[in-house]
Image: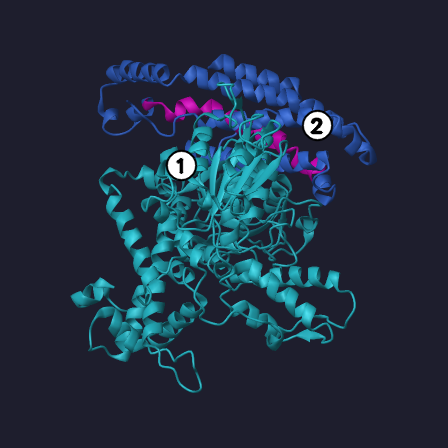
Chain colours: A cyan, B blue
Amino acid sequence: MNRSESTLPRILIIDDTFGRRLQSGANEERANLCRSLLLDDVTGDQDGGRSGSRIARPVAEAVFVRGQLPVVASVGDSVENHLSGCLEAVRSGWDNRAATVLPWALVLLDLCFYTGPVKTGGRSQLEGVPEGRPTDDDPSGYFGLEILRAIRESCPGLPVVILSGKPRPDSREIDAHGSLGFINAGAPDALATFKDYLARHGLIPDESGEIIGTSRELLLALREVRRLGMFSRNVLIRGESGTGKDLIAKYAHRLGRPKGPLVVVHSGNLNPTTYYSELFGHARGAFTDAKEQKEGLIVKADRGDLFFDEIGTAPDNVQAGLLRVLQDRIVRPMGSSDTRGIEVDVRFMFATNEDIEGRSLQGQFRPDLLERMRSDGTILLPSLRDRREDIPLLIDRFFRAAMAQRPSGVLKGVSEDGMKALCVNDWPGNIRALEGCVRKAVADYPDVEYLYPIHFQLPRHGAPKAPESAGVPQSQPVVATPGTSEALRLDDLLRLVEQFDFDRVTRGDLAGFLPKLQVAFYRFLGRTLEAALRQTSKPTPADPEGELVYTAALKLLKGTKKLTTTAAWDEIKRLFKTAESVSSVSPTLQKVIARAVEKRKTNPVAPRKQKADTSSI
Amino acid sequence: MDSLKGKSEQQAKKHGFDERRYSIPSMDWNSRRSLLNHGWLAKTYPTMLGAWRNVLSGDAPYDQFADQFLKHDFAQWERNRGALVALINDFEAALSPRTLFEVHPLNQLDESTREWLSELVHQLWRRRYSVDALLHEATSLIAAADATYAPLRAAIDGTPPDQRLERLRSEADRFAAFHTICRDLSEAISNFPHEVKVT
């Protein structure tokens, strides 16, 4: 299924019974599960029969995997568990960023997988199901737990829920390995539980179509929004300029508190002299021009949401006033003699693209307000370059919107080359810049049939990122060619690290953050290598951007003058040795890593045997 | 225990089931439980019931599956309930630590000692694991399932095929109740101890 054709969530089900293929035709147990959970089986391994009928309004598409070999087992075969096959299936829908299919919304994982010989009239009389061995039934040795552990290691962040006919085992065992829940496959409420898990834990696109995209990064952000639910009170939305923070606020409002209004405050647009009264309201005569009592924007948002854009620009008095409101949910209008104030039920969503922690450290933003603002969670919006697979969908939407305003002309679409050029651009101005670029091309060239690269005014390749990108920790160019701004940023980061009390951190404090830290770590490594490659690149007449010199870059990183080319390739392989690490870096770097793997296929590096200086990278 | 067996048999006769003694000598009790309870009663059968309920609600299509369910698959309860009853009835004999007196080294005890000691160990085990309560719950649920199944069977058999869907939609709550009872029965059987224990 092409990304543009379906936005139905796509789930992976790893189960020995439901995942098996039969020589005699359709797997009826699977067909029953699909009807029970309202799934559209898109595995593509069934021969029609009873599984041929499709659900009219499916909840999700499902791909089934047995997790064992042989997948089609006959009497006399011995069925054995197949961990690497499971992981391959998992990764195919998670790590493959170039895939034309949606990432897994959820993985449903069985616990007990029966192994051993298949006999006539075997277990439950089910075709192809083996007799089972005593160890299969031992909860401490469930193969499902082994798969769960492996998924957690190789695909952190992938939501996994246990689907079993067994009673729920010791919760500590499955919770500790990262399962987000448990569905009893045969329970009367299995469908309701599945829908609930899918909504809260699944990676599902915005059904309204307002937020465009199906990339893993975007879907993770949308999931964070849904998890906030209606009970959150203070939320911070972070992302570079042009990433669509306002759309995220609308999405959160639509899902969480649709009965009340969504009031939007553009902090940067408010007049500094009337800012406070606009927000909190004022009593009659509160100041010279206050001829009438006025209700503030916060009171207007009662029972709904207040989206506060560019919060970093709020003046000191507004920061102090906001802190009071966030603490007790009572608004005190300017000049009001009513000491009780006005009680409000408002959820505050703050947005910023600034390095607000840095500003807080420099005394430009109240740290206590910052803590309050993010007390119920922070939503990180990915930059467009971190979700490139969404660019074609966005281009399509923007092109059609632009064409709707210019019905004349012969323009039919964006050429393949044009699409490629737009997709590889870094888009420091993110979605807003992409939209502007497409609109301008449509406006400027209505008389060509297809738009080619020459028709687009692309941001200059290698142009510096938008300065506000510092507001998004994931995208911080922590190591780059030293310059004043980077030095300051690094200084702030170091100060944060120094102030952080690591001794008091427990494992529980880190719950849910470890996968993000892992991604951030590999991104950091990636940026480090990219910075070194940029620093050592050699401009030539044919390539003004500079030819990448891998060995020189690695020498720079390692601080050594002696390094062979093959050793440089090995170091690159060593830095990015897992699929997760590769998927966390830029496409350019992914190509570099692929080349390293190709160059050094037969020479796996044993890190422990490396010289001491290599471990410092 | 005997009274529980009798109750089950009475229920079976009342609802017209063929009560038979199921015995699978090649399989130990836990394997039988795994096959019947975890394999069939907890997974494949209720999944089918869930699918059927979605047909009734209109969320899933009325197709070959529905026909097959009404003609054949729903009746799996009739075909397997006897094996379930046998499983429940055999539990005490199979999992009691009294069985340890039949194997080395406790089978070396003199007969009179073995007799009173094994009976004492058995009674202590019954008390510690609330065996009566476990058996009572499971047997009651078998009876409840029979009582719910019978009118559904009658409704299916007594309605012409072309009117079945409409007729059975009015039984949706009873199908839901039967589904819930199956789940509860499965959990009750899962609650039986998993191994012979003396502690």
Q: Is residue A83 above or below residue B185?
A: below
Say whether residue A122 is visible: no
Q: Residue at x 42, y 78 (%)?
A: A545
Q: Identify which amino acid the numbered label 1 is placed on.
A: Leu
Give the main secondary structure, helix, strand or loop, of the magenta stretch. helix
Say few, some or many: other residues with alpha carbon within 10 Å of mark 2 (under 14 / 14 to 19 / 20 or more). some
Q: Residue at x 27, y 52 (%)?
A: A494
- Kindly state the secondary structure of the residue where label 2 is placed: helix
- Kindly state the secondary structure of the residue where label 1 is placed: helix
Front residue of A396/A48: it is A396
Front residue of A20/A323: it is A323
Q: Is residue B93 magenta?
A: yes
Q: Is residue B106 above or below residue A408?
A: above
Q: Which residue is mark 2?
A: B172
Magenta region: B69-97
Front residue of A391/B102: it is A391
Furthest-front residue in view?
A288
Q: Which residue is mark 1?
A: A369
Q: Chain of mark 1?
A: A
Q: Chain of mark 2?
A: B
On the image, the x and y values in percent for residue A241 come to 50, 55
Q: Is residue A349 magenta?
A: no
Furthest-bottom residue in view?
A541
Q: Identify which amino acid the numbered label 2 is placed on.
A: Ala
Q: From the image, which quarter does the C terminus of chain A lie in?
A: bottom left
Let me know if marks 2 and 1 both belong to one chain. no
Q: CA distance from mark 2 to mark 1?
A: 54 Å
Say few, some or many: other residues with alpha carbon within 10 Å of mark 1 (under 14 / 14 to 19 / 20 or more). some
Q: Nearer the viewer, mark 2 or mark 1?
A: 1
Q: Is residue A175 left or right of residue A569?
A: right
Q: Is residue A36 left or right of residue A380?
A: right
